[in-house]
Amino acid sequence: MKSRSLLSKAVVSSLLLFQVLSVSASDLTSDIQEVIKGKKAQVGVAVLYKDDAFTANNDDQYPLMSVFKFHIALAVLKKMEKEGIPLTAVVTLGPSDIDTKTWSPMYKKYKSKKITLSYGDLINYMVSQSDNNACNWLINFVGGIQNVNDFIKNLGIDRIQLIETEKSMEQDIRKSYNNWSTPLSVTQLLRKVYTEKVLSDEHFAFLEKAMLASASGKDKFRAGLPKEVEVGHKTGMSYRTPEGIRMCDADVGVIYMPGGEKCYLAVLVKDSKETDAANAKIMADIAKKVYSHYTENAGKNSAPAK
């Protein structure tokens, strides 16, 4: 696949940098440009579909927030494989593991500071419901966030840094910037997991199902796609700073295309002064543009670039 630099131009108050790594993807430029122009936010986009690769504003470091729970799940499942721990094995979280003030559907259900459940259920709480207590416990299970960071980098994903936990980011919201990735690195990781043997068949099927069951972000990617189209995704959202800046709002995932192919999409919004509804609409609109582009152009042959 040949790399081609397509565009570098000023749009309103921001510089939108687009890189297209195939000819057919170049048609996405004007559509994506139309969605993000004039927005009071930095918006990074990456798309991988078949031989196409497209990025916009990829050269920045975007906070991930709860998107990193996908990365954590990978490290957890790999450790379980190595140690022979089945998904049905049971663990108990005690009072020191339960923060009653953080986002925790698990705590809301059990209403106890001593919770016993399976590893599988715990991972599902983290991935599908973005539970922070489950996340912090599973980070400790793999030996700390640095081990997650190392595991992801050993997969060949280098433009990423994970050094914070949900607990540390709640203690200082600006630490959210310390967990970052480029949009392209996120999509490269997704594609690697979905197309290569990163996990066992059992664990991949489990994680794929958890991503498809995501309860958050119904106004993000999901809102921009036809109802019959499946999308496995993970969202993330930071607190707002005292100045009203939403440091991170994100959706990343896998769109199951009509022909059986998968489209890997990441939209990372940074330092947004827009409303939450406007941020979500950016993600929904980009998902809609990407899906429409590839379904409408299915079967068409691209002319050589000149």
Image: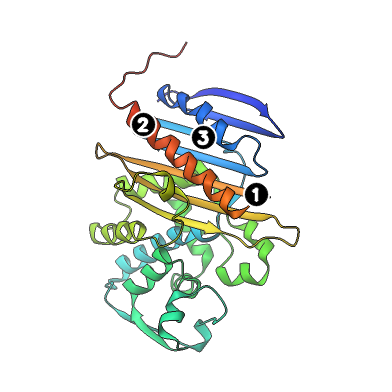
Q: Alpha-carbon neighbours of circle 1 within 10 Å: few (<14), some, or many (≥20)?
A: some
Front: mark 1 or 2: 1
Q: Earlier in the sequence, mark 1 or mark 2?
A: 1
Q: Which residue is mark 1?
A: 274
Q: Measuring 40% from the left and 23% from the top, which residue is drawn there?
A: 24
Looking at the rendered structure, the kind of residue marked 2 is Tyr
Looking at the rendered structure, the kind of residue marked 1 is Glu
Residue 27 sits above or below residue 179 on the image: above
Along the line of sight, which residue is nearer the eye, 77 or 94?
A: 94
Q: Earlier in the sequence, mark 3 or mark 1?
A: 3
Front: mark 3 or 1: 1
Q: CA distance from mark 3 to mark 1?
A: 22 Å
Q: Which residue is mark 3?
A: 55
Q: Is residue 39 left or right of residue 6?
A: right
- Applied colour scheme: rainbow
Residue 87 sits above or below residue 274 on the image: below
SS for dot 1:
loop
Q: Position of residue 109 (x, y in %)?
A: 41, 81
Q: Position of residue 70 (x, y in %)?
A: 43, 58
Front: mark 3 or 2: 2
Q: Which residue is mark 2?
A: 294
Q: CA distance from mark 1 to mark 2?
A: 29 Å
Do tag 1 and tag 2 residues touch (Cβ < 8 Å)?
no
Q: Alpha-carbon neighbours of circle 3 within 10 Å: few (<14), some, or many (≥20)?
A: many
